[in-house]
Amino acid sequence: MRVEEHPIINFTRGKKVNFFFNGREVEGYEGEPIAAALHAEGIKVLRHTHNKNRPRGFYCAIGNCSSCLMKVDGIPNVRVCVEALREGMHVQTQSGRGELRDNN
Amino acid sequence: MLAKTGVPTNEDIQKVMPTEKRAEQGPVAVMECFQKIPCDPCFTACPKGAIKEFSDINDTPSMIESKCTGCGICVAYCPGLAIFVIDYTYSDDEGLLKMPYEYLPLPAEGSRVETLDREGRLVGTARVVKVQRIKGQQKTPVVWLAVPKELLMTVRNILGGGISCGG
Amino acid sequence: MITTDIVVIGAGPAGLNAAITAASMGANVLLLERNVLEGGQLIKQTHKFFGSKAQHAAARGIDIAKALYQSASQYPNVTMKFGATVLGYYEDGVITAEHHESIITIKAKKYIVATGAAEKSLPFPNNDLPGIYGAGAVQTLTNVYGVLPGKKVLMIGSGNIGLIVSYQLLQAGVQVAGIVEAAPEIGGYLVHAAKIRRAGVPIYTSYTIKEAYGTEMVEGALIMQLDKNWQPLSGTEIDIPVDVVCIAVGLTPLTELLWQAGCKMKYVPQLGGHIPVRDENLTTTVSDIYVAGDVSGIEEASAAMVEGKLAGAAAASSLGYGSGKFAEIRREALAQLAELRSGPAGAKIRKGLKLLVG
């Protein structure tokens, strides 16, 4: 859920954009962290851990704790609490450690 | 006690009450600030010199009640939202309370609102006399409430915004 | 490679003040900040600050961030890079940073590390469930991005962050089920506590969180009372159904760069963990590295701002800038810090700083 009216803050949001969460089209605002856009859509489970398959959300929101790692446009281990949302992004819940990209 | 509950006790409140003589003369500030913390905006905000200059910034404020006009500027400036203005001379049976209120929606002037005490418990209703914006602190509106005189030192909030009744 | 007089790492209250002060004395400053927004944690501080005029008292953190940024922007000798994460400090005094997906190398004569702090976690069963966040993280989500964390929150910790975030959640229209505090007394400023009590929020002192529960996300928590010896009292459990649990049990300095640079560190629990040993001018044991703000020990933002000025002035002065100005800035800063730390609320900080000597 988003705050529309606030006693102290005037929120300035970017352009409304569509992106994909596990293939499903959802909405967010350009430039906001991916995790914020997902939260606004009610999505709190961002990945499952490699060892015990436990669900994880974000924890620190400053790119510090690595709780919020997701696969973004095919790249695993993206800290979505600080990664800016762009139009058309493909965001996927990550399971396990994530495969490193092969640059060759 | 305050440090355990977050609610000032009657004993705490007695220490900051204006004298009976001063209270009978019209609006006056009650500074519900009981803890030594480094903070002095009430002193710099008061245009009447009614708050003594801090010799140590950690001191709790000390008021010269004869100089206070109950204007409410300090109410909007206090970072702790700990200052209220009380006026026992407002009408025969009602007193006027000025309190800081940083929630939405703001109550409409003339409307009746449910009032809460220092623990968020319902204590009755009040009429909203005015919603005042103080220059420099527009985002801390000062709400003026006409409340029964006997509740002037009890009412400290109104129901609304994200506030839920404390039961 | 970029070369400059002074690199300031972190554009929060300490770093911005360090950059402004050093630039005002004539030094060339490069300010690096990993966030894309300026102001560090000020960007979510919607409450009015304590302190006195010199530390912007009664202004809101969000407005202080803007004012400091504008002030820094006015200096032609200040360059700022946002979205720039410093990755490493090398033995030849060079640092590397990631900026816009490329690596830049920088060599400065002096470094001011103002990297701030991170929130601590708390061990209890199911503390990893989605819906359990650092309180500051929820503050960022709500106040910077205008997104609510959920409907009903349980706050763990009654320090200033726990109290302030609870208040700000109420302002955003989120219910707060209660604040849980293991200590017998409230940790933060009592005016903050009074403010949320009169909004109907209970504060459970001498209580702790026993466990959280839920399958995919948190659905509630059990809290229980502690006795005089901080031992749980059986039969005192209270089940509190909530969809959000916020952890506000303190901060720990972000000191990675200082360790890497070989600065002597000391464990001072009163100041949040391992902090750099430094002199009164905030010079670490690596003479080209200064520190300011929470990275040098957890305090209020007002103290961070003053420390920033002091470190900025000390670094600029060591390079021969601002002849004569330093003594005055130093005297003022030290007097302000002494004042901010002098009251009962500063007792823990004073104790911690005493441990740091030697």
Image: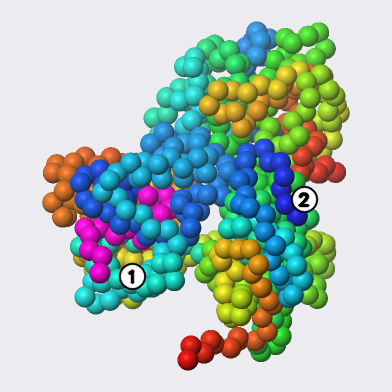
Which quarter of the image is occupied by the C terminus of chain C? Answer: bottom left
Rendered location of residue C81, percent (x, y): 38, 58
**Image quadrant of residue B123?**
top right
Magenta residues?
C1-16
Tell me what residue is drawn at x 41 percent, y 33 percent: C53
**What residue type is disc 2 on?**
Gln
| A104 displayed left or right of C156 | left
Neighbours of disc 2 within 10 Å: few (<14), some (14-19), many (20+): many
Quick check: A7 above or below B18? below
The numbered disc on residue C104 is 1
| Residue, disc 2 | C175
Q: Tell me what residue is drawn at x 71 percent, y 37 percent.
A: B103
In front: C297, or C59? C59
A81 vs C335, left or right, is right
Tell me residue C3's x, y (percent). 22, 63
Q: Tag 2 or tag 1, which sits nearer the N-term?
A: 1
- Locate residue A74 relative to residue B109 in the image: left or right: left
Q: Up-down: is B53 above or below A51? A: above
**Residue B142, percent across and down?**
66, 25
Give the letter of the chain under mark 2: C
Mark 1 chain:
C
Is A33 rendered above or below residue A95? above
Q: Where is residue C267? Give x, y as percent.
A: 40, 70
Q: Is residue C299 magenta?
A: no
In the foreground, C286 or C11: C11
Q: Residue at x 67, y 59 (%)?
A: A17
Give the image quarter of residue B69: top right
Quadrant for residue B28, please give it. top right
Magenta residue check for C6: yes
